[in-house]
Image: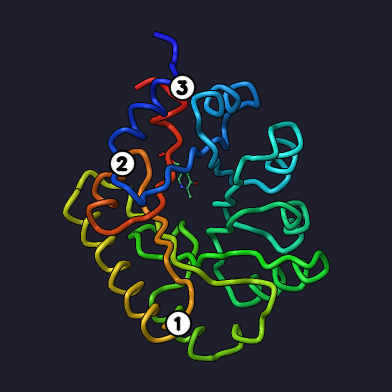
Amino acid sequence: MPVNIESNIKRISATLPEGVTLIAVSKYHTIEEIEQAYNAGQRHFGESKAQDLRIKQQALPSDISWHFIGHLQSNKIKYIVPFIHLIHSIDSLQLLQEVNRLAGKQNRVIPCLLQIHIAQEDSKFGFTPDECRAMLDSGEWRELKNVEICGLMCMASNTDDSEQIRQEFKTVKELFNYIKERYFANKRFNILSAGMSEDYTIAIEEGSTHIRIGSDIFETH
Ligand SMILES: *Cc1c(COP(=O)(O)O)cnc(C)c1O
């Protein structure tokens, strides 16, 4: 059976509680496939390569909100600075400083999430919870006027053990609450980006506000 992107979008959207944003992860998919999702009403899309994202952004309608979800290299930031809606994958203070510098040149304030390394795999990027608290304690981020830290992002372990996945999401939610209270008491800090095709229902139960779904939308299953 061919993939029905439109019905997948509608099926998933219908199950989401209010306040949860669906990001369609289109990183392996063409402009035509993205258009099908767009025509089903989808407006938030996620990509993991800066140059691909730039090309798709230029080819597609301007009312799409583009999310950057991959590992971001400093020399690629320039491709996305003019239009990016949210960068989910800040994994060092240096990267945040460089996004700030380039955003300043364009008079933008770019919303960013800190990526938390919580999974068992070494392959995933991000701050450990300790590194994240240490970075925030340093206070240097407070001087950055062209980025706004507005939440956390994480990826759970790639495992069938749903209790482990749930525990990882709980850990990140606790860290989120702690950081919000300690560093962002009177600020907007309200995004928890957690959950992919395999684990988004658990992520939502554990407090996710933004789910990132690729294969469940764009592939047969
Ligand atoms: C690819 C990717 C997703 C989507 O994964 P699916 O399993 O296809 O839903 C979500 N988040 C990140 C960071 C990704 O790289």
The amino acid beneath tag 3 is: Ile
Task: Tell me which label, 2 or 3, sits earlier in the chain.
Answer: 3
Mark 2 vs mark 3: in front: 2
Q: Which residue carries the number 2 mark?
A: 16
Q: Residues within 10 Å of mark 2 (few under 14, many from 20)?
A: some
Q: Residue at x 36, y 52 (%)?
A: 19
Q: Amino acid at mark 1?
A: Asn
Q: Residue at x 63, y 21 (%)?
A: 32
Residue shown at 51% from the left, 39% from the top: 25
Whether residues under marks 1 and 2 lie with C-beta atoms below 8 angstroms apart, the answer is no
Cα gap from disc 2 to disc 3, whole angstroms: 17 Å
Whole-number angstrom distance, CA of label 3 to CA of label 1:
40 Å
Q: Position of residue 10 (x, y in %)?
A: 38, 27
Q: Are marks 2 and 3 in contact (CB under 8 Å)?
A: no
Disc 3 target residue: 5
Q: Is residue 6 left or right of residue 58?
A: left
